Image (cartoon, helix red, strand yellow):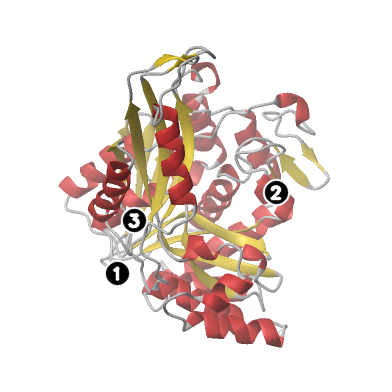
Amino acid sequence: MFEEIGRKLSGMVRIPTVSGKGNEEDYRIGAYREYLAKEFPSVFSQASVMQVGEARLLKLAGSGENSRPVLFTGHMDVVPVQDTGVWKYPPFSGEIAEGTVWGRGAQDMKGPQCALLSALDELLFEGWIPKRDVWLYLSCDEEVGGETTAKAAELLKKEGLHFEIVFDEGGTICENFMEITDGRAAMIAIGEKGSLEYRFTALSEGGHSASPQKGSAIVRLGELLHEVEHMEPFRRELSAGSREMLRKMAACHSDEELAGNLLKASGEEGEYPVLRRICRDADNLLGSTIAFTMIEGGTAFNVMPKKAVLTANVRISAAETKEEVTAKLEALAGKHDLICECAGGRDAVPESSTMQTGYRMMEACVNEAYPDLPVIPFILGGGTDSRYFAPLTDEIVRFSPMHAEPWQGRGVHGDNEAANVEDVRDAAKCYYLLLSKYL
């Protein structure tokens, strides 16, 4: 089954779909959609198709045995390639070598998309009729914020649709997750952090560097940087989902000492000493984080600027709201005579439960497709298109049932992105189980 999946993925990768301003020549999204329709004819001939800009909504009508629809969402676009010279094979060659498809998008997320469409196409060719309506959303601009997806969600809302489950990308089958899992594990994201942009502006009189004044614009920004670097401005809290992640890790770990510490960490409060000792990414688990990403100011080496601006990205957890985080950062900025403004972004998406239907469906399919593979929940630090559909569903499952070796995972948004053909085929088999048994 799925003998042609490597060839199909290769063709998908060969069509560049780089979204974002300045990438118009490499944004061949129309050709990509035509390729999908040709390679997955049962899906596109049997589904009703709605246009949402360059994106597409597909509906496969169910038998009515189950009246609650589900939605699979995934993006067609990819990020740019920074340096083609360091790639083992050209990034849009779709080269099949060493049992692997090479190129931008092979992992994120044309590989998983190929697996899902292959499973759907095979089932429909066999005469399968889903028990309920199954929707697919093929996003065109996920990598640049998903503006079109917001429109798609609004369209579905006007249609009065409410999904039992939304399936999206997020977690994968990976190895040594956070350097504390015991080998491979299927990491299913049951929540995701939000992302907020803040700008800190310092104003001063400026002047010549030969007569420097105390408390200049750059110095005050530096004082803020130093204070934030040595404090914890946000609420430190281990969420229910992260606690369960640690318990699941403990239950399947072969190192008894580490398993015991994972279990202890799952019940900690306050300073979380055990978690901080065993996990270098403890801060990411314990709430919101802040990263300073851009700074601008001076125009000459001997002129003190009248204005300097520092930009930060806050990955906000569900433990706090945008309003709470903004109030804390405004207070910190005020201490250093700075102006703080939130320039945009979104709150975190609330966590779902591992006891909900979608998670348990996916867990059962992974257990069957990948025997003895641990299934572990976690909270995703990045954002997915699924956040736009959160008001329209009871549950979001963020997971692609496809294995990514460590070097392949590093290629996502980086160099030498690639997907093993057998891994894509295995993912298609897992989707086949999910669709045929539960949907």
| Rendered image quadrant of residue 172 | bottom right
- 251 vs 328, left or right, is right
Considering only vertical position in the picture, is 301 above or below 332? above
- Identify the secondary structure beneath mark 1: loop
Residue drawn 66% across and 60% down? Answer: 426
Disc 2 or 1, which lies upstream in sequence? 1
Label 2 and label 3: CA atoms lie apart by: 28 Å
Label 2 and label 1: CA atoms lie apart by: 38 Å
Pointers 3 and 1 in contact (C-beta within 8 Å) = no
Foreground of the two, 427 or 47: 427
- Identify the secondary structure beneath mark 2: helix
| Residue 364 in view here | no
Label 3 vs label 1, nearer the camera: 3
The residue type indicated by label 3 comes to Ala
**Furthest residue to the right?**
98
Badge 3, how many Cα within 10 Å: few under 14, some, many 20+?
A: many
Residue drawn 34% across and 51% down? Answer: 387
Q: Which residue is mark 1?
A: 66
- Identify the secondary structure beneath mark 3: loop
Q: Residue 374 in the image: state x and y as whole percent.
A: 61, 76
Considering only vertical position in the picture, is 29 above or below 167? above
The residue type indicated by label 2 comes to Gln
The residue type indicated by label 1 comes to Asn
Q: Which residue is mark 3?
A: 348
Q: Which residue is mark 2?
A: 408
